[in-house]
Image (cartoon, rainbow, N blue to C red):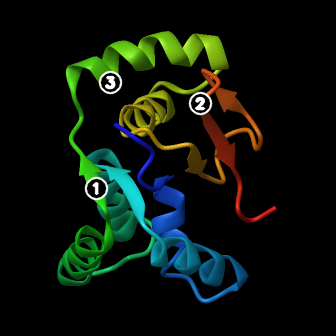
Amino acid sequence: MPAIANFLDTNILVYALADDEKSSVAQGLMKRPFVLSVQALNEFANVGRRKLDLSWERVSGHVEDIVIAARLILPVEPEFTRAALRLAPRYKLAFYDALMVAAARSAGCSAYYSEDLHHGLIIDGQLTVINPFR
């Protein structure tokens, strides 16, 4: 599949709700075509309830807005798990980060926006990790 959009990590979705400098950056990324894994939606819902203390209704509303805005949302597929098991040790990634990277690669994305991974890391010569808050 050709590169269709940037891949956004969960932290971008969370920062889009904040009211600070990171918020404007995250909101800007979400105004351009982007791809997510359903894993990011699930993590966002968890953070929304647990850390942001949002009501279930507000979490649901934000998730619906994200779903509408996303160009593509990928399910977690068995081949992503197999790829994550290869990527995690090779690039020193946590398993769940590697799972999202595998999803981004499957969508043909060339940019993976995240605060959590090593800025500038190039994965398999195809996907570049970008920390947009640097």
SS at circle 2: loop
Residue at far right of view: 134
Residue for point 53% across, 80% down: 27
Residue for point 65% across, 19% down: 91
Mark 3, Cα crowd under 10 Å, few <14 / some 14-19 / many 20+, is many
**Pointer 3 residue:** 80
Q: Tell me the CA gap for discs 1 and 2.
A: 19 Å
**Pointer 2 residue:** 126
Mark 1 or mark 2: which comes first in sequence? 1
From the top left corner, tell me how far across and down residue 30 is, in percent: 47, 73
Is residue 25 left or right of 79 when viewed as pictured?
right
- Identified by mark 1, the residue type is Leu
Mark 1 or mark 3: which comes first in sequence? 1
Is residue 86 left or right of 122 when viewed as pictured?
left
Q: Nearer the viewer, mark 1 or mark 3?
A: 1
Quarter-of-image position of residue 65? bottom left
Is residue 73 left or right of 21 when viewed as pictured?
left
**Pointer 1 residue:** 72
Q: Tell me the CA gap for discs 2 and 3.
A: 16 Å
Front residue of 58 and 31: 31
Q: Tell me the CA gap for discs 1 and 3.
A: 16 Å
